[in-house]
Image (cartoon, grey):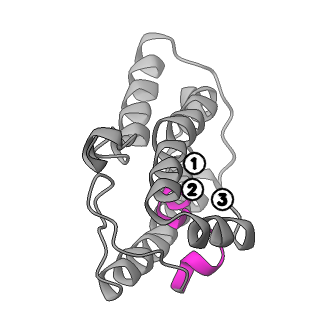
């Protein structure tokens, strides 16, 4: 059986998960408005939470490029990257997506997005991260397991 046939990764564009959830939460708010008294600071804090993680995501992408390995979730991974933001979290891009999602919820005042946060987290965790971890374990074995013991999945 070829490596491609055993590859457990299936989701080609993980940012679609929080993007679609934010759009669904906006639609739910139009259909079933929730009377939420948002604090005055919610828009500005939300904007910061949308913009700030972009630096983390770009840093992670730059680190992947520097190590000449795939940025695309279904791409060919050539090495275990343990520098840059990957020293602190195994998933800086997905962590950034969750923070951006929370920021979008606040900036656009989408109360239904709070309800969908756990499903978004679970979709990223079980639909994207766990299959990626299985792929990396099969591809790199002990070096990946050692990295996994040193660096937390999220923070």
Mark 3 and mark 1 residues within 8 Å of each other at the beta carbon:
no
In this view, the mark in front (3 or 1): 3
Residue 77 located left or right of residue 111: left
Mark 1 and mark 2 residues within 8 Å of each other at the beta carbon:
yes
x and y percent of residue 73 in the render?
33, 54
Q: Which residues are magenta?
A: 84-96
What residue does disc 1 label?
A: 102
Quarter of the image for the C terminus: give it.
Answer: bottom right
What residue does disc 3 label?
A: 153
Label of residue 99 in the image: 2
Q: Earlier in the sequence, mark 2 or mark 3?
A: 2
Up-down relation of residue 89 to residue 23 (above or below)? below
Spatial CA distance of label 2 from label 3 is 15 Å
* Residue at screen point 48% across, 66% down: 140
* Residue at screen point 44% across, 51% down: 135
Q: Residues within 10 Å of mark 3 (few under 14, many from 20)?
A: some
x and y percent of residue 92 in the render?
53, 66
Spatial CA distance of label 1 from label 2 is 5 Å
Q: Is residue 57 magenta?
A: no
Spatial CA distance of label 3 from label 1 is 19 Å
């Amino acid at each position: 059986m070829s490596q491609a046939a055993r590859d457990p990764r299936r989701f080609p564009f993980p940012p679609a998960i929080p993007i679609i959830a934010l759009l669904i939460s906006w639609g739910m708010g139009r259909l079933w408005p929730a009377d939420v008294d948002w604090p005055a600071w919610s828009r500005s804090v939300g904007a910061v939470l949308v913009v700030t993680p972009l630096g983390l995501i770009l840093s992670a992408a730059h680190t992947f490029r520097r190590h000449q390995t795939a940025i695309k979730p279904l791409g060919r991974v050539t090495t275990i990257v343990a520098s840059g933001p990957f020293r602190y979290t195994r998933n800086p891009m997905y962590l950034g997506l969750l923070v951006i999602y929370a920021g979008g919820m606040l900036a656009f005042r989408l109360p239904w997005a709070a309800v969908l946060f756990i499903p978004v987290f679970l979709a990223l965790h079980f639909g994207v991260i766990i299959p990626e971890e299985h792929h990396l374990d099969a591809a790199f074995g002990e070096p990946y397991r050692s990295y996994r013991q040193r660096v937390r999945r999220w923070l």
